[in-house]
Amino acid sequence: MRHFLSNGEELIIRPARLKDAAGLLANYQRMTAETDFLLFNHNEALELDVEGEEAFIKSHIDKPRQLLLVAEVKGQIIGAINVDNTGHDKRTHIGEMGIGVAKAYQNMGIGRRLMTAMLRWVEEHDDLWLITLQVASANEKAIQLYRNFGFVEAGRIPDAIEITPGVFSDIVMMYKKV
Ligand SMILES: CC(C)(COP(=O)(O)OP(=O)(O)OC[C@H]1O[C@@H](n2cnc3c(N)ncnc32)[C@H](O)[C@@H]1OP(=O)(O)O)[C@@H](O)C(=O)NCCC(=O)NCCS
């Protein structure tokens, strides 16, 4: 899907391909230096490698209930959204999502477009109808984005993530029935 950003640049949102591994990894590693709201910290992210990223992409290409979309500007991956499914028969209907957009491209509507594309894909999969996510309570912008798309809070686990050394945040569990 092609879009135009307010600065005139073209944004492409498309499924990840194996050859995106290096670009996707570089974007993730960069994002972990820019935000404390991702699961990996920067040092952990630097330990990831291209082979592992290829395996991550492949698992999303091969499994019908998994999705990995990338956001690309000027040939560079600057964001992604994924939906993971455990593969257990009892949980075929559940997908857990994650999203990230590089700082230089935030607040341009890319998160909103990734969410829209993800939910369209979910709508096409009748057997997948419950999307869940976990977000740090301090991540107000992400929570607002999720609320905008009808996600509701199911509860929170106090101090479940150490955002920076010694600084703990609640984890908010959110869900949407599609
Ligand atoms: C959360 C994130 C994906 C949003 O991406 P984005 O491209 O900046 O989002 P958008 O520009 O589409 O804006 C999304 C919404 O955020 C809301 N928003 C923007 N700034 C906000 C702020 N300061 N406070 C609260 N809400 C805000 C708006 O409602 C906006 O929706 P609108 O444009 O329809 O009004 C991005 O900030 C990010 O990757 N952050 C770091 C990684 C992260 O936190 N990932 C989620 C982990 S659970």
Image (tube, helix red, strand yellow):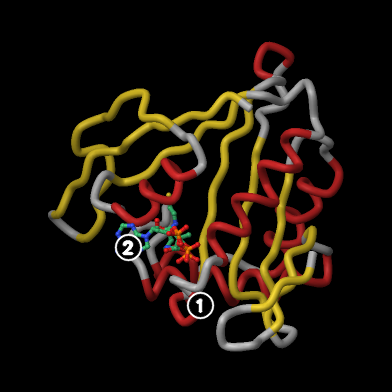
Asked which quadrant contains residue 119, the reply is top right
State whether residue 133 is above or below residue 130.
Answer: below
Q: Nearer the viewer, residue 109 or 126?
A: 109
- Quadrant for the N terminus in the image: bottom right
Q: Position of residue 131 (x, y in %)?
A: 58, 31
Q: Nearer the viewer, residue 59 or 50?
A: 59
Asked if the beta carbon under badge 1 is closer than 8 A to the nearest atom of ligand 1, the reply is yes
Identity, as a three-letter code, of the amino acid under mark 2: Asp
State whether residue 93 is above or below residue 152.
Answer: above
Please name the residue shown 36% across and 68% down the image: 35
Q: Position of residue 178 (x, y in %)?
A: 63, 27
Please name the residue shown 73% across and 43% down the image: 120
Please name the residue shown 71% across and 20% down the image: 92
State whether residue 47 is above or below residue 74.
Answer: above
Asked if the beta carbon under badge 2 is closer than 8 A to the nearest atom of ligand 1, the reply is no
Q: Which residue is mark 2?
A: 36
Question: Which numbered disc flags the more N-terminal residue, 1 or 2?
Answer: 2
Q: Which residue is mark 1?
A: 105
Q: Position of residue 91 (x, y in %)?
A: 65, 18
Identity, as a three-letter code, of the amino acid under mark 1: Tyr
Alpha carbon of mark 1 to alpha carbon of mark 2: how far? 17 Å
Q: Position of residue 108 (x, y in %)?
A: 50, 73
Q: Is residue 172 left or right of residue 152?
A: left
